[in-house]
């Protein structure tokens, strides 16, 4: 039986502002990526989200982003690699404190938004994120876009990696995600997204380079928690996967060379 992970970006409320359907979505996921307070989240929200994940037996991951509350971390920034390394380590470490207070550990690191997308194509930025994760712990898994520079950087740093795909997003031929401001970038229909997720789990991500096409296997599928109807999407995706013989669980740590 093949295994697959369903992850969701969570803990993105802050102060008086509420974002996402964390309590409704959490039971259908196997991994939670919890915001570290830079693009979203705050200490109280981080603590509450960690407790919710522990309650449902969901694997806890750090979701570091750019310091950009106004833009929700989706605006590109130009920071030196050392700055990126420090801000990622800061956010991962903060979440780890809350996790350990609840008897849990941070199992993976997945960058958010513009940081994630830039690192998918920028080797220097990807390397900074991988170094921060490695400095925190060699036992964390680095999550990145399947076939991207971030996955390469994680392997080069000696980390376990999880190749990610997005059931509710359209792809370009090179394996990158279509920009959100372009037509058809987001798949709104839950049934279509679930069918797309099942295809990605079975076939992987198609990437065309230099006239040739390859299929990159996928370890984890992302459900966007800030999208309206996220709980319904997560439930339908999980049902489609389980009905087709997939076992749902977090990625296992396999270090390069093992």
Image (cartoon, rainbow, N blue to C red):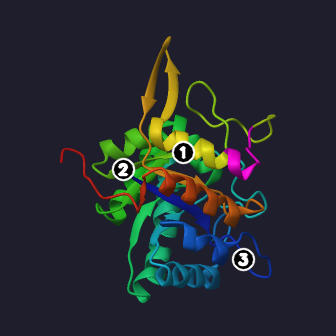
Tell me which label, 1 or 3, sits earlier in the chain.
Answer: 3
Dominant secondary structure of the residues highlighted in magenta in the image? loop
Tag 3, which secondary structure? Answer: loop
How far is the residue under mark 3 from the one under mark 2? 37 Å
Magenta part of the chain:
185-192
Q: Earlier in the sequence, mark 1 or mark 2?
A: 2
Q: Nearer the viewer, residue 157 or 223?
A: 223
| Residue 185 screen position, x and y as percent | 74, 38
Neighbor class of circle 3 (other Cα within 10 Å; few <14, some 14-19, many 20+) is some
Above or below — where is 235 with respect to 181? below
> Could you say whether the residue bearing mark 1 is in a helix, strand or loop?
helix
The answer to whether 30 is drawn above or below residue 221 in the figure is below
Residue 2: assigned label: 2
Q: Toward the viewer: 100 or 30?
A: 30
* Drawn side of residue 155 relative to residue 117, left or right: left
Q: In this rendering, is residue 214 above or below 7?
A: above
Say which of marks 1 and 3 sits in front.
1
Say whether disc 3 or disc 2 marks the residue closer to the N-terminus. 2
Residue 77 is situated, as x and y percent measured from the top left of the image, at 66, 47
Q: Residue at x 69, y 56 (%)?
A: 73
Residue at the far left in the pictured view: 258
How many angstroms separate mark 1 from mark 2 (CA)?
12 Å
Residue 134 higher or lower than 213, as above or below = below
Which class describes the residues within 10 Å of circle 1: few (<14), some (14-19), or many (20+)?
many
**Residue 113, percent from left and from top:** 64, 52
What residue is at 69 percent from the left and 35 percent from the top? Answer: 178
Residue at the spot x=51%, y=78% of the render? 53
Residue under pointer 3: 14
Q: Which mark is residue 198?
A: 1
Please say whether residue 7 is one of the residues in the magenta stretch: no
């Amino acid at each position: 039986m093949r295994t697959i992970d369903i992850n969701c970006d969570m803990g993105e409320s802050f102060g008086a502002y509420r974002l996402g359907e964390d309590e409704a979505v959490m039971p259908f996921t196997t991994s939670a990526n919890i915001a570290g307070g830079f693009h979203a989240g705050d200490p109280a929200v981080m603590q509450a989200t960690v407790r919710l994940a522990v309650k449902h037996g969901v694997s806890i991951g750090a979701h570091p982003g750019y310091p950009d509350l106004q833009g929700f971390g989706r605006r590109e920034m130009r920071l030196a690699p050392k700055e990126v390394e420090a801000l990622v380590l800061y956010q991962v470490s903060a979440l780890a404190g809350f996790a350990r207070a609840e008897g849990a550990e941070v199992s993976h690191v997945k960058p958010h938004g513009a940081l994630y997308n830039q690192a998918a194509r920028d080797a220097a930025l990807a390397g900074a994120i991988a170094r921060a994760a490695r400095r925190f712990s060699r036992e964390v898994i680095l999550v990145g876009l399947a076939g991207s520079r971030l996955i390469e950087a994680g392997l080069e740093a000696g980390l376990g990696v999880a190749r990610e795909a997005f059931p509710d997003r359209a792809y370009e031929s090179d394996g990158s995600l279509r920009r959100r401001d372009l037509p058809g970038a987001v798949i709104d229909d839950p049934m279509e997204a679930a069918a797309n997720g099942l295809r990605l789990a079975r076939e992987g991500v198609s990437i065309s380079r230099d006239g040739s096409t390859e299929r990159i296997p996928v370890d984890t599928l992302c459900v966007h928690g800030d999208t309206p109807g996220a709980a319904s999407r997560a439930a339908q995706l999980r049902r489609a996967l389980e009905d087709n013989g997939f076992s749902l669980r977090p990625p296992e740590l396999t270090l390069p060379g093992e």
